[in-house]
Image (tube, grey):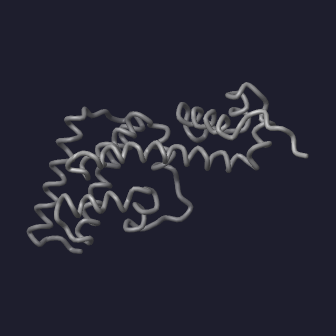
Amino acid sequence: MPPKAKFSRDEIIEAAFGLVRAEGPTALTSRALGQALGSSARPIFTVFRNMEEVAQAVTDAAKSLYRKYIKKGLSTSPAFKGAGTQYILFAVSEPKLFQLLFMTEHRQIPNLAGVLPLIDDSYEQILSSIQTDYHLEEGPARRLYQHLWIYTHGIAALCATNMCRFTEEEISGMMTEVCRSLLTTMKAGNDHD
């Protein structure tokens, strides 16, 4: 009969999530997690097979929190701008979780068309909001999303790494300016979809 777990799965995930949230993904070790629980590392492995499983649970919890930000953004008007703003605010409010989700090296490098669906579970909702808000077909909407994600990700990465800070007004203004420029180019027939 396996030993009785000293901590529940949720208690371990909560402690691991708190550790990564405060110190970043590299801080998640069995020793550090045991210390966060006020124990040795041994009780972790009565619930989880290995630390990779713990790390995946933390990633899932971070994605869940991120989806709340995006849901809030998509409930504003225009929804696409709201989603982009919330992406940046997630980086500002949760820099270590942002780094975990969006600044971790991948084993295989996807092309630009494949990266957004790979890293963002809200991809389809965001793409749909672009088509609705800006009356674009799927191809141009995807291109607008890609261009603005690159721009938005740059702002978010600057914030998440404390390289630069922006006010919400500055973020809103920058995003509006770039989006309008791209839409003007696309509507003038200069998009190369």
Above or below 113: residue 97:
above
Residue sitting at x 49%, y 48%: 63
Q: In front here: 22 or 74?
A: 74
Left or right of 96: which side holds 112? left
Q: In front here: 134 or 51?
A: 134
Considering every residue shown, the one lying at the far top of the view is: 38
Considering every residue shown, the one lying at the far left of the view is: 188
Q: Position of residue 101 (x, y in %)?
A: 49, 48
Question: What quarter of the picture does the C terminus occupy?
Answer: bottom left
Q: Position of residue 86 (x, y in %)?
A: 33, 43
Left or right of 185: which side holds 48? right
Residue sitting at x 42%, y 47%: 67
Above or below 103: residue 19:
above
Considering every residue shown, the one lying at the far right of the view is: 1
Residue sitting at x 17%, y 60%: 134
> How many marks do you count on the picture?
0
Q: Position of residue 69 (x, y in %)?
A: 38, 43
**Residue 159 found in image quarter:** top left
Q: In front here: 162 or 72?
A: 72
**Residue 161 found in image quarter:** top left
**Residue 129 found in image quarter:** bottom left
Q: Position of residue 24 (x, y in %)?
A: 55, 37
Residue sitting at x 27%, y 55%: 148
Q: In front here: 166 or 94?
A: 94
